[in-house]
Every structure is written in structure tokens, then in C-alpha cells.
Amino acid sequence: MGRVIGNVNLRSIVAIVAVELMLSSQFGCASRRTTPPESKPAPVVFDSLQEDLKKPYATLFETAAKLEYSESQIRAMREYLTQAEDYCVGRFKDQSKGLDAQIDQKQNALKAAGVGEEERHNLHCDIQNARILKSEADVIAGHAIPVAYDNKQAKLDVIQKWPAELQAIRRSIADGTYRSRRWGDVQDIGFRKLEPDQKDDIKLGREAIRDLKQSGMMPKEVEDEAVVSYVKQVAQKVAANSDLLVPLQVTVLNSKEINAFALPGGFIFIERGLLEAADDESQLAGVIAHELSHAAARHGHKLMVKATIASIMYQAAQVAAMILTGGVAGIGTYYAIQYGFYGLGLTLNLTLLGVSREYELQADQLGIQYAWKAGYDPSGFIRFFDKMATSEGYVNGVSWFRSHPPFYQRMVDAEREISYLPKPEHAIITTTDFATMKASLKKVSFKADVDSKKRPSLISPEQSCPPPSKLVFEPDQPIETICSSPQIRPAPALVPR
């Protein structure tokens, strides 16, 4: 029998996910656009809109009412973005197919008579390098590019719809109706009845952690005391200003994935990659507050009771499933784990999440309230989200977005909640302790990178090969530039900092 995790049989989960992956690979490759977009607004409008779509959400919230784009111009831009995404995905899918052909060619060459040991070694190196590149192309085509264009479409929605939303917010503030919103009693945070029996989730969380560790899916913990104590200090400050009624247990994982997650019972996990990505303490506090909110609202318990594949351990089971299927899926998974594209947040299908989109929006609202109550700039979470979507999240933050609601709804709901909160006089944005933590984190990250290159790798079984190549995919470049001609460059050698 397969192990039972929570209320769900692990073998069943593995089978379900394996079938989903097979179906997505068969039916997720519809005909793609092979030529650049043809439909776009007039050049002067197009150039202006392109610049506006690069601006942070916070800036667009401030300026959207002053922008003067017509409905037809917005529609033309929306169509252009749709065509551009389709074309961009197609370019990287073509890259993946080309790499498949290279792999086949090299594998056939191995069968030729008279292949010497040196030539065989070189062919092995070429094959594993092509496999890595194909995995990267698949990640970019299947996830990173959609994230980039979802973000552009959401910012276009802000330009189009925010002025009316802002007027509605002002009316609700003026007539006092905003106080009757769900969890509008912010003056009673810590004393209001959010969800009873939070303590009943502690056992469930401990069992989940045990299963993750036993299955080898839990990354090692960061051991640097300066990093760990700082993160715990921020987390405890937020928890003291929340509705969490159980002890908060914070673990910092030594994984380059940009992610954080919560397990039932007040167990919060922050991954090293998220600490690297955060620009200030209010961003980190906002993320911690969001994850803490899942525990306070007992979201994990509710999903697990319904046997919905939504908790982090089921995401880990997906990793196991793809490894067990072998072939390209297995190679892609190991590439993802080692190079930081995914990790425990791997490719969770939204159709399996049930009501977890609603739970994410609830955690956004509560998290903003908790960060605000703790004295932080409540926009920290929005600013981190915006950074991830605009300049970091194309690839490295894929799992950050995978199970989350549509960008526009999320950003507008968050900005609305901030508008309803009393304005803090001296909101904390960052501290010297944050800068100190960042300095210590650099040493941790460098050592982790060095150690990862020493470990045996299932994607690099051939030793003494050149460093793997990398697809050129720079988030700070316009996405259209990146997609016009995917390029490959050798990976730089690791040098001490």
C-alpha cells in the first residue's frame, strides 16, 4: 500500500499527477503563433502603454485616473498582448523541439561503430547539456512567459478599471459601509473570533512535517544564527499582532526557490530564495503575515479535511510523481529542484485547488491587516508581489504565482484593504537588522551554491563536463526582446564573492 498523508493516499496522488502531466503534455500543445503580433494600437499609443505597463502597481494606482486611453486602444493592446504571449511561448517551444532533435542525434551517434572513449564522453556531455536546456525551455514556455503576460494584462486592467474602483472605495469610506466588510473589525485583531480550535491543527502540521522529511522532500534548514534569529524575530512580531492563537514555529529552509508556505498548526517555512529576493523588511513581513494568515484561518486544515490536493505535502508528492515517471519529466524535475525554478511548489494544477483561490485572497486581506497592526508599511506585500511579477518572477518565482488568484483581483483587493486601514504615522519599511541579515545571507547562499555543485546529480551523471549552458532570459529586458530570438550562452563559472 502507498503511504497515507493526512487523509489522502500518496500512491493515488502520484497516479493522479502522473496522468495530469501526461495529458497536459499531449493536449497542452495546441497550434502556436509563428509570426510576431500583427495587431497593436497606433505607435504613439503603443509606446506609451508599453512604458506604463512597466510601472509598479503602486504607481499605476496613483496615476491610472490621469491616463487617457480609449476603450478601443485598450482592446487593441489586450489583443496584442494575447498574440505576443502566444508567439513568445511558441518560440521557446520550438527551442525545446530543436533540443529534442539534438538529443536524438547525439544518442544515435552513440550507436555508431568505432566510437572512442573521448568521443563518447563528449557525446554524453552534449546530451546532458541539451536535456538541461530543454528543461529550462519547457519551464519558460509553460510557466515563466504566462506569468509575465498575466502581469501585463493585470496592469492593463488597472489602467482601465482602477479609476471606477477608486471611486467606489471613496464612496464606501465616506458613507462608512467599508466597516461592514469581512474582517473589518481591525481594532479587535487578536481578540476577535476568526477560527476556533486552531490548536487542533498542531498534530496535523507535525505529521505533515514528519512525512515531508521522511520522503526526502524537505530541504535542509539554514544554520546561520544571524539569519534564522532575524527571521524569527520579524515573524514573532507579526504573530503578536495577529489572530493566531497557537505558538508560531518558523523554519528557514536552505533552498533557492523564492517561496514560503504554511502548514496547519502555526508552522511557517521561509525559503532562502525569498529572503534573497526581498528588498526591505516590510516586504518580508508582508509575506510572513500572509503565510501566518493561512494558519490563523485554518486553511490547511479545511483543505486537507476535504482531501483536496492543496497542501505543501501534496505538492511534494507531485515532485515524487514526476521523478517516478522518468524520462523528460524526471530530468525536468531534478533540473527544477537544483536550479531553483521550482521546489516544493512544483506545478500545482489550479483545477485541484477547490476553494484555495478564495483562501489566498483571505490570506492577503488578513496578512495586510497583521503587517499594518505590527507597524509595517502594509504595501510591503504588494511591492514584493510586483517585484516578483515584473523583475524576478518570470522564472525563479514560478511557484509563487502558480496557485494564486488572478493578478488584477489580487492587487485591487489588497489596495482596497490598505485604503480602508488607518494611515500609520511611522510605518516601518526597513531596518538595519534587515541589512545585517542580508550580509549574513550572502555567505549562506554562496556556500549552498558551492555545495550543490559538489553533490551527485541525476541530471549530470557524466563527470568532468563543461558547465551547463543557459537560455538567455533576462527579466529586466522587454519580454518581446527576449522572445524574438531565444539564445543560448555558457553558464558562468562560480567565483567567490
Image: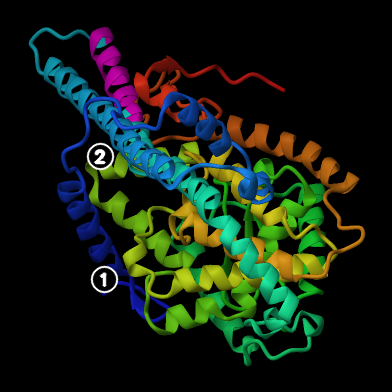
Where on the picture, by quarter, is residue 468?
top left
Identify residue for label 2: 328
Where on the picture, by quarter, is residue 10?
bottom left
Q: Is residue 126 above or below residue 439?
A: above
Left or right of 19? Residue 360 is right
Residue 380: horizontal and vertical position, in percent? 72, 54
Residue 126 magenta-highlighted = yes
Identify residue for label 1: 12
Q: Residue at x 82, y 48 (%)?
A: 226
Q: Amino acid at mark 1?
A: Ser
SS type, badge 1? helix
Where does the magenta region start and end?
118-133
Q: How is the image coloured?
A: rainbow
**Lower position in the chain sequence, tag 2 or tag 1:** 1
SS type, badge 2? helix
Count residues near mark 1 (Cα–Cα under 10 Å), then give few for <14, some for 14-19, many for 20+.
some
